[in-house]
Amino acid sequence: GNSVTQMEGPVTLSEEAFLTINCTYTATGYPSLFWYVQYPGEGLQLLLKATKADDKGSNKGFEATYRKETTSFHLEKGSVQVSDSAVYFCALSSNTGNQFYFGTGTSLTVIP
Amino acid sequence: DTAVSQTPKYLVTQMGNDKSIKCEQNLGHDTMYWYKQDSKKFLKIMFSYNNKELIINETVPNRFSPKSPDKAHLNLHINSLELGDSAVYFCASSPDGQSLNYGYTFGSGTRLTVV
């Protein structure tokens, strides 16, 4: 079946630190992979996506590369800001496109 | 223009009451979803409708009943509310049920508190 496993949080970093949030997946076929971000009190917003192996999604300084060989889609940012404090969700879309599978979310707090 | 809008944003009600949450999307998407997010931020799909037809119905108490009058609206009615129903409920939509390329667009959530 399909599933997504994220590193557990919470994660606390100082401003300008390097961020990695690990995400691995299990899927049949060729899924698409996504990162969503949820700021406090808000809904989920699409941060970036990759639809095939070796694709790199990027947005707002965040990057993630679709690695089929390691079934991973780790989120990275070179220098985090206080405004990046949020909950980050890794997600997988089945190749039938009918359902998303979300990870458990990783809470990030960036301190000045 | 809000793409996926939910009302109300906050809902506080007593146990045993019946309440509804409304969702509307103006994106022209064919598929809409309801998710429940618990206090630990875990997201669980509840229902999915494609062009007014129910396509996903996860294990949810039958006190929860979705209704889709047209493909732009998906409402959630909850009967006999219980304390454990307290959560944030998110509506989402995607084009043609093909989230593979487009992902989902989420509403801002309805925080339901049952007292």
Image (cartoon, coloured by chain):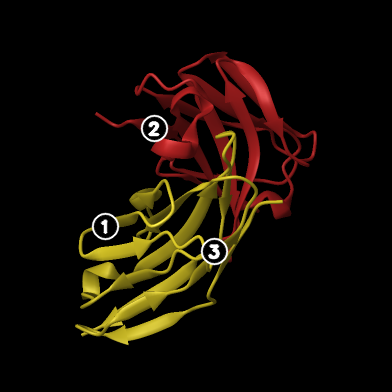
Chain colours: A yellow, B red
Q: Amino acid at mark 2?
A: Ser
Q: Are marks 1 and 3 in contact (CB under 8 Å)?
A: no
Q: Nearer the viewer, residue A69 or A73?
A: A69
Q: Secondary structure at mark 3?
A: loop
User: Looking at the rendered structure, which numbered label has been put on residue A58?
Assistant: 1
Q: Disc 2 sits on a residue from what chain?
A: B
Residue A81 coordinates in the image, percent (x, y) = 21, 75
User: Which residue is pictured at 42% across the width and 69% down the height?
Assistant: A74
Q: Amino acid at mark 1?
A: Ser
Q: Amino acid at mark 3?
A: Thr
Q: Please name which of the two marks, 1 or 3, marks the residue nearer to the observer.
A: 3
Q: Find disc 2 in the rendering and name its residue.
A: B5
User: Looking at the rendered structure, which numbered label has been put on residue B78?
Assistant: none
Q: Secondary structure at mark 1?
A: strand
Q: Find disc 3 in the rendering and name its residue.
A: A71
Q: Are marks 1 and 3 on the same chain?
A: yes
> As drawn, is B98 to the left or to the right of B76?
left
